[in-house]
Amino acid sequence: MTLHDLSPQDLPLVRNTLEKYQNLEPDFTDAVLVTLASILKVRHILTVDERDFSVYRLADGSCFERLWV
């Protein structure tokens, strides 16, 4: 497992994500995950949140590939 930190400089990106998807009422955690995935260029995500993560997009416009257990 690798842990990644957000720096204070990343917080405006999180705010942009929250504003972009405000109609979904994203929580801070989802916004951070979407932002970090964009920064780290990670497309694969393990989530049961099919509704939101089928809408969220990375900064380059690509969609997430949801992994299921």
Image: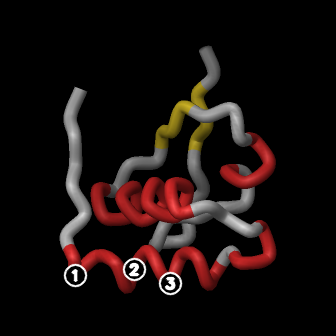
Residue 45 pos. (x, y %) = 51, 38
How far, Cα to Cα, is label 3 from label 1? 13 Å
Within 10 Å of disc 3 (Cα), the crowding (few <14, some 14-19, many 20+) is few
Amino acid identity at mark 3: Asn
- Dot 1 and dot 2 residues touching (CB under 8 Å): no
- Dot 2 and dot 3 residues touching (CB under 8 Å): yes
Image side of residue 29 versus residue 26, left or right: left
Tell me where residue 9 sits by quadrant: bottom left
Mark number for residue 13? 2
Q: Secondary structure at mark 1?
A: helix
On screen, residue 53 above or below 7: above
Q: Secondary structure at mark 2?
A: helix
Residue 20 pos. (x, y %) = 63, 82
On screen, residue 65 above or below 22: above
Residue 35 pos. (x, y %) = 42, 65
Amino acid identity at mark 1: Gln
* Front residue (pair 36, 41): 36
Q: Which residue is mark 1?
A: 9
From the image, which quarter does the N terminus lie in? Answer: top left
Q: Secondary structure at mark 3?
A: helix
- Give me the residue at 63% from left, 22% from top: 68
Image side of residue 69 versus residue 58, left or right: right
- Give me the residue at 73% from left, 51% from top: 54
On screen, residue 1 above or below 18: above
Image side of residue 45 versus residue 6, left or right: right
Residue 2 pos. (x, y %) = 20, 34
Amino acid identity at mark 2: Leu
- Give me the residue at 61% from left, 14% from top: 69
Within 10 Å of disc 2 (Cα), the crowding (few <14, some 14-19, many 20+) is some
Mark number for residue 16? 3
